[in-house]
């Protein structure tokens, strides 16, 4: 199989456009072989996937009809890591980890429309459905004191402009409810949950007010989380499903999924930092809960992670175990269905067809990709170990699955069989993520 050539060095070589092969996408204004889209003014491609080129600080473009690299590139910020689509699919938000910025790429106009200056690094941000509001958790944002760094940075996803920040110390992960009226935030220093009310401003600062939640069950007993890293909301925003990562993320107790009744959050003040009560209506014990996908139509939450248990593989590498669970959200008495998956940590999760693809890092001699079949019928670790899995996307026009493993580009069919291409697919440089945008 032809694959992306990756040079893992800080002084990575500049992009070699076309990699020495014929590339009709760069020879004519309209590529009649795989595209003729006038509203895509640069590539004119019918179907595209973007690839973040880490050291070259550009987005490379894959022709998703012919499964090949084009010569087109778009400049973004320094060290682009991962990409995230806007809810309506019109924008691609690129996290530039070396520049502490987010580039907003307009998919139709094929141009970076705005650059968000975050004032620090982020690994968690969200945008609204109308593309008018965005929020990024920036744990090292400077608030004028070394004692309390951290903020929720507010920005406009379309033009990159920023507003006055919500100064919430050590804010690291966040999620927005489906009504787009509240954020739930978790920090890098504790296992608490914080609530940002986007409909009310702090009386003294004039920015959205935030509260520390005091979690209790229906009997009034305190509920403790264990390094929460993600939250997903019900379709009516009345329930927040909080994933506690547990030992995988430095927690002292096992992973869980807790259900917070958001309607129970009724603060009587607009002073940020106030402790307010919130009721936990249910809590499920799971073997891993680093990330998830919620199916609000069928009331199912899928989660993947590690229990924190380590073992030594045949190559002498110490690896974390891996688990995938399905939770029936409609039944508080249900027991999550669970299946073992490949080893690793810091997982990414994608639903492709009726199955799930799970990527991980630090997997030893084992592939970092696992395919979990619908209904948890089976979990298959791919046969070839290619390194850390940092990107997974499906090209819906062909059904092919593009991945980034070990900084290189690979593609498969939906069953996980590696595919080959008759075209050039080599990219010079370290790549980190891939995203199909059509």
Image (tube, rainbow, N blue to C red):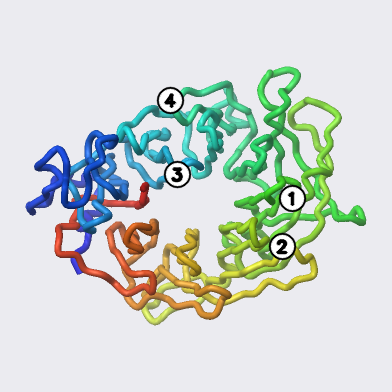
Quadrant of image for the N terminus: bottom left
User: Position of 289 compared to 344: left or right?
Assistant: right
- Is the residue under label 2 in contact with that under label 4 (CB below 8 Å)? no
Q: Pointer 3: what residue?
A: 85
Residue found at x 31% / y 50%? 49
Q: CA distance from mark 4 to mark 1?
A: 32 Å
Residue 6: x %, y % from top left? 23, 56
Q: Is residue 112 visible?
A: yes
User: Position of 352 compared to 306: left or right?
Assistant: left
Q: Above or below — where is 191 with respect to 286?
A: above
Q: CA distance from mark 4 to mark 2?
A: 38 Å
Q: Secondary structure at mark 1?
A: strand
Q: Is residue 51 visible?
A: no
Q: Secondary structure at mark 3?
A: strand
- Is the residue under label 1 in contact with that under label 4 (CB below 8 Å)? no
- Is the residue under label 2 in contact with that under label 1 (CB below 8 Å)? yes
Q: Nearer the viewer, residue 140 or 259?
A: 259
Residue 190: x %, y % from top left? 67, 47
| Disc ID at residue 410 | none
Q: Residues within 10 Å of mark 1 (few under 14, many from 20)?
A: many
Q: Residues within 10 Å of mark 4 (few under 14, many from 20)?
A: some
Point out the tag, 4 or 1, that comes first from the N-terminus: 4
| Disc ID at residue 239 | 1
- Is the residue under label 3 in contact with that under label 4 (CB below 8 Å)? no
Residue found at x 75% / y 32%? 273
| Disc ID at residue 159 | 4
Q: Secondary structure at mark 4?
A: loop
Point out the tag, 3 or 1, that comes first from the N-terminus: 3
Q: CA distance from mark 3 to mark 2?
A: 26 Å
């Amino acid at each position: 199989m032809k694959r992306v050539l990756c040079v893992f060095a800080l002084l990575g070589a500049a992009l070699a456009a076309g990699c020495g092969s014929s590339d009709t996408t760069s020879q004519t204004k309209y590529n009649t072989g795989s595209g003729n889209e006038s509203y895509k003014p640069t590539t004119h491609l019918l179907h595209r996937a973007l690839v973040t080129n880490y050291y070259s600080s550009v987005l490379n473009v894959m022709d998703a009809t012919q499964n090949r690299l084009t010569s087109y590139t778009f400049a973004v910020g320094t060290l682009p890591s991962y990409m995230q689509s806007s809810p309506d699919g019109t924008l691609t938000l690129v996290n530039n980890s070396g520049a502490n910025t987010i580039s907003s790429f307009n998919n139709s106009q094929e141009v970076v429309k705005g650059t968000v200056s975050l004032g620090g690094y982020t690994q968690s941000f969200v945008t609204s459905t109308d593309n008018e509001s965005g929020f990024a958790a920036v744990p090292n944002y400077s608030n004028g004191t070394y004692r309390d760094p951290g903020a929720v940075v507010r920005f406009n996803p379309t033009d990159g402009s920023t507003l006055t920040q919500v100064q919430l110390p050590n804010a690291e992960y966040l999620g927005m409810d489906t009504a787009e009226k509240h954020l739930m935030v978790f920090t890098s220093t504790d296992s608490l949950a914080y609530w940002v009310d986007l409909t009310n401003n702090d009386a003294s600062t004039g920015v959205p007010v935030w509260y520390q939640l005091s979690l209790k069950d229906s009997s009034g007993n305190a509920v403790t989380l264990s390094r929460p890293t993600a939250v997903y909301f019900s379709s009516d925003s009345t329930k927040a499903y909080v994933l506690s990562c547990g030992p995988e993320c430095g927690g002292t107790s096992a992973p869980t999924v807790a259900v917070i009744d958001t309607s129970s959050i009724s603060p009587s003040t607009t002073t940020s930092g106030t402790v307010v009560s919130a009721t936990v209506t249910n809590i499920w014990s799971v073997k891993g809960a680093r990330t998830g996908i919620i199916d609000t139509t069928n009331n199912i939450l899928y989660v993947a992670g590690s229990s924190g248990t380590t073992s030594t593989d045949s190559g002498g590498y110490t690896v974390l175990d891996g688990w995938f669970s399905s939770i029936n959200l409609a039944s508080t008495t249900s027991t999550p269905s669970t299946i073992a998956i490949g080893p690793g940590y810091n997982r990414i999760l994608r639903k492709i067809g009726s199955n799930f693809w799970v990527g991980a890092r630090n997997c030893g001699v084992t592939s970092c990709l696992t395919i979990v079949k619908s209904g948890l019928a089976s979990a298959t670790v791919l046969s070839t170990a290619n390194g850390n899995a940092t990107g997974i996307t499906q090209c819906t026009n062909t059904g092919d699955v593009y991945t980034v493993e070990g900084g290189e580009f690979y593609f498969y069919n939906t069953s996980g069989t590696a595919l080959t291409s008759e075209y050039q697919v080599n990219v010079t440089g370290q790549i980190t993520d891939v995203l199909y945008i059509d």
